[in-house]
Amino acid sequence: MDPRRVVIVGAGFGGLSAARKLAVAGVPFTLIDKKNHHLFQPLLYQVASAVLSPAEIAVPIRSVLSPGRGRSIEILMEEVESIDTAAQSVHTVGGDSVAYSDLILAPGSKFTYFGHERQWAHNAPALKSLDDALNIRRRVLLAFERAETTSDPALRDRLMTFVIVGGGPTGVEMAGALAELSRATLARDFTNIDPRAARVILIEASDTVLGAYPDRLCRYARRQLEHLGVDVRTGAPVEEIDATGLRAGESVIETSNIFWCAGVEATAVGRWLGVDTEKNGTVAVGPDLTVSGLANVFVIGDAATARDAEGKPLPALAPVAKQQGAYAARAIILRRAGKPAQAPFRYRDWGTMATIGRSSAVASFGRLQLTGFVAWMVWGGVHITYLVGFRNRVTVLFNWFWHWITYAKGSRLITGPDQAATTDLDSPRAIDRELDKTVNALEEST
Amino acid sequence: MDPRRVVIVGAGFGGLSAARKLAVAGVPFTLIDKKNHHLFQPLLYQVASAVLSPAEIAVPIRSVLSPGRGRSIEILMEEVESIDTAAQSVHTVGGDSVAYSDLILAPGSKFTYFGHERQWAHNAPALKSLDDALNIRRRVLLAFERAETTSDPALRDRLMTFVIVGGGPTGVEMAGALAELSRATLARDFTNIDPRAARVILIEASDTVLGAYPDRLCRYARRQLEHLGVDVRTGAPVEEIDATGLRAGESVIETSNIFWCAGVEATAVGRWLGVDTEKNGTVAVGPDLTVSGLANVFVIGDAATARDAEGKPLPALAPVAKQQGAYAARAIILRRAGKPAQAPFRYRDWGTMATIGRSSAVASFGRLQLTGFVAWMVWGGVHITYLVGFRNRVTVLFNWFWHWITYAKGSRLITGPDQAATTDLDSPRAIDRELDKTVNALEEST
């Protein structure tokens, strides 16, 4: 094997962007990811709210890169255990060692429970992977099914109350989607309950939703959510969560359904490298996106804190990761060709967007701010363009079109452990017991 | 609630057919199913072989029937525990009791391991539900991923050997699809292994595949399978299965991948009713599809043994169940209107089909027998027509078109417990350990 092999960890927006650039340039590399697919995370909430199927927002890494037998591209479905920066090799949990000439670390971020992982994660699942999304989808749909058959009014109320923690884009989009699911999609599907009576509550610790967006858009987003029937409670940091509900600020809410979209922190990249990290676990990188003292180790995407010319940290967004991935790849290509290094990394801000419900959104492009249907069209166009894979684009477009016209079916399938077979009248515990197996399996795989 | 309520158990082809007919006639009914969706089982093997997504072959029952608040249609996601034919009520595992005026039982069939359930089911998962299909898909894709990273040649061989037990339509279709997956779809996706070298072996106890089909079609199917690279071994009843392989007839095969598509028997309907059953667990019914001595209890579909005018049992096929469901509904409608009963049930045989690979099939319509591409076109047309839901038809058609043109991606996503994180070099055991959680969860939910 060619000793001078680039190793990329992570097949998200950052890692895949680097990989594609290296592939085009014919530079051999090994890509390591613990999953077999690239996930289009901005649309993950649509799997969780039963609008899209997993296959529409994910594509097998091997499809994108088509390694073939040339040995120039190697893809390993492994999990990183540690990195030996002196010997310049990556060690995997499975016992493999992969030597590198250059290393691009793009393992992404995860949601954190601010130290309460053990207690809270079980009752308030996060939304980060396809399995998370399917888990949440199952819990949402089962809640309605269980509410339909129960004769206990207190239990029915808990089942038909949905709490989303975190007023960033993920939480806002999830809340809007759940409101639409209950108000419109499921509205005529049940006999003993009225899904439109479901409560959807969005909890945010700070005093505004979409805090990173311009004020005007924050206010618009809040109005739209309330118009959709979402109960938005800001200034309410979560203090306690258990199987029957949560306490946040002055609110005490009894619910079986808490979904966690707050508190982002990096994965274990600092530990791998043995370097200090920022407060949120990210690794600080220089203007060329490498780690101080390790000139051939790049950290990009959510796992890194890179700063712009004013010293302000770049946001944890997909376009940032994509541009950084291309930059890191280009740096390696130039070095190998003996050419001078490129200028420091500069993020070109194409704007940020968030959608609220099926036909409204906010979009900020510097001075230009859009709201409403226009923003939603732009949002849709951008996301379709960024989606990897022509086939995915067609099917997602079709699904959105169908969903938009009919408010209809989406992908409301309950797969995995069913809750039909239970003699336990205390449904949340029964559901939790059954889902324990799934959650434990998920926890052990992440 | 209207005391004269029809109760239907099962939302498969039989139960759903009856439900739709009753809905149109405005007869109130309650439909009970332990899942929330109707599954188009003839295409289940395409989910297991990573061509289609679950959402493309399944539709939520509530979408098909749209109960609304009228209380005329009630859908309960429950599992039947027992039936009190004297008191005329159905008892569910969840503790509900549903009184009936007429009862239509259509709970379907399951695969049996001929008494070896405990020992064999774990190592040889069956293909009956969406969860089964996703489990098999995961095992297939993980086998290739694991083979790519292992340095143990014996393990690699076991991982790249796939054994399908059962030479009926399901097994034949599954074998053909796996052969195509490894020979074409995945062929250029790996670096350290050549997926085209994977072995696909079809095991059948009798001396022919597709035993229920005319001889000419059996021989054609076998030739087609062998042309696709499937090793067809007939006259080989399975005698032993463990984690490293199986023994069938004179064959001893070391493999990590055994998929069970043999031995069909009915679900527990005989036990529910407290009546004797046929050898395969089905309940014998009369010419009007009711149980002897229980004039208002119909058993239809795979769970019943109905006989034609010559006394020959009707086959366990989707069209049979559909026609029986419509017949039972009509009987109830006529009785309520005080009209005379209809003539005995007569199955109208529209022919049977099985596909082998992506562009070949066998189709038998009485005297007319088709093979090859023409049969495949007919097969495709019929299945698309039978698929419930316009949206599903469009997306499946598009996916087939795409897959046919490109041999490409399909839905090759690995979700659920990953095998990337393992330190155990004996991969089948590591995989089994991880999958234990999933399999146990599945076993407890079925």
Image (cartoon, coloured by chain):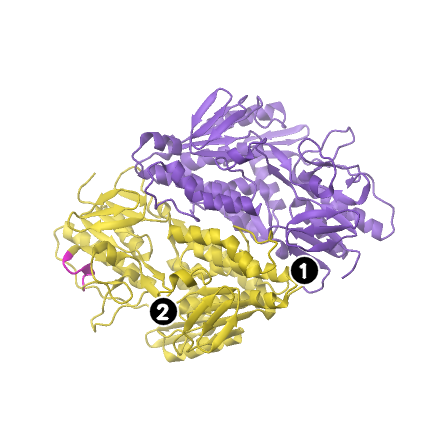
Chain colours: A purple, B yellow
Residue beneath the point at 59% across and 34% down: A112
Magenta residues (range): B287-294
Residue beneath the point at 36% across and 69% down: B352
Location of residue B302 by image quarter? bottom left
User: Is residue A186 visible from the viewing direction of this image?
Assistant: no
Type of amino acid under label 2: Thr
A150 left or right of A75 in image: left
User: Is residue A361 visible from the viewing direction of this image?
Assistant: yes
Spatial CA span between label 1 and label 2: 41 Å
B208 left or right of A346 in image: left
* SS category of the residue bearing label 1: loop
- Give percent across and percent down for residue A289: 77, 40
Which residue does the numbered mark 2 point to in the structure image?
Answer: B352
In this orientation, which residue lies closer to the viewer: A267 or B412? A267
Location of residue A352 by image quarter? top right
Report the quarter where the C terminus of chain A lies: top right
Which residue does the numbered mark 1 point to in the structure image?
Answer: A67
Q: Residues within 10 Å of mark 1 (few under 14, many from 20)?
A: many
- Give percent across and percent down for residue A132: 52, 43
Type of amino acid under label 1: Pro
- Give percent across and percent down for residue A265: 63, 35
- Give percent across and percent down for residue A59: 59, 52
Q: Are marks 1 and 2 on the same chain?
A: no
- Chain under callout 1: A
B342 left or right of A408 in image: left
* SS category of the residue bearing label 2: strand
